[in-house]
Image (cartoon, rainbow, N blue to C red):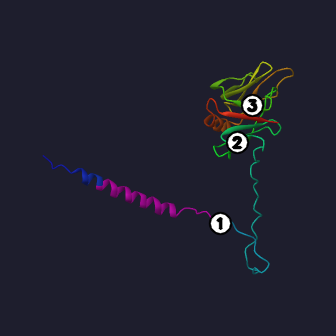
Amino acid sequence: MPARIPSWAWVSGLTAGAVVVVGVLAVQADQGPHPTAAATRPSTSASAHAHAPAPALTHTTAPPAAPDDSGTGRRIVYSLGRKRVWLMDERGMPARTFTVWPGTVSPDPGSYAISRRVAATKGSDGVQIEHILYFAGKAGVFIAFSNAVDGSSPPPVGAGIKTGGVRTGKADGDALWTFASKGTRVVVVP
């Protein structure tokens, strides 16, 4: 009968093998392309043999701040005029902001709460939607945040059709769904 190898020997052998594999992968990664720091424009005192100046760096702007009159604490802020939503964390700081496509019926400015969550359904415009978060109603129309399953923006609505969907992009709809549970406060500002 062959001798049995103790479990500590197996563990030691597997650990040594893993260290070797990680070492080999590190050497291979070190031989690949490496990121380089952005070049700056040479100063006027730079030598004539310097490289050509780098293209100007693009300036990114910070996302717009939430409206001052939107309350405090954890909440969703929806600006009717800006067609924008902010997800505000517990400290009252914006965790995410994004533009939206409002329906033809908008809620009045005020404070609401998420009253119902529906994972998916067909919108009043016939598009499959998901992440539906109901928070208001007006003129017999329910108003809710949602996004199209296929990520599309809503098509133009015909005259006289009342829709209360506030559509978001797909990634924004995912973030909103994760952020908002039933009872989450929604502050609507002009």
Where is residue 67, by image quadrant? top right
Residue 71 spot, x, y in % from top left: 73, 40
Q: Secondary structure at mark 3?
A: strand
Task: Kindly identify the residue that appears in the image at 80 percent across and 78 percent down.
Answer: 44
In the depicted view, which residue is nearer to us: 7 or 61? 61
- Residue 185's label in the rendered image is none
Residue named by callout 2: 72
Circle nearer the N terminus (3, 1): 1
Task: Kindly identify the residue that appears in the image at 73 percent across and 69 percent down.
Answer: 40
Left or right: residue 78 compared with residue 174: right
Task: Kindly identify the residue that appears in the image at 74 percent across and 79 percent down.
Answer: 49
Callout 3, which amino acid?
A: Val
| Label 2 – label 3 distance at C-alpha | 23 Å
Callout 1, which amino acid?
A: Ala
User: Magenta stretch: dominant SS?
Assistant: helix
Residue 156 spot, x, y in % from top left: 82, 28
Residue 149 spot, x, y in % from top left: 66, 30
Callout 2, which amino acid?
A: Thr
Residue 23 among those drawn in magenta: yes
Residue 158 among those drawn in magenta: no
Where is residue 54, by image quadrant? bottom right
Circle nearer the N terminus (2, 3): 2
Residue named by callout 1: 37
Magenta-tinted stretch: 12-35
Residue named by callout 3: 166
In the depicted view, which residue is nearer to us: 1 or 125? 125
Q: Secondary structure at mark 1?
A: loop
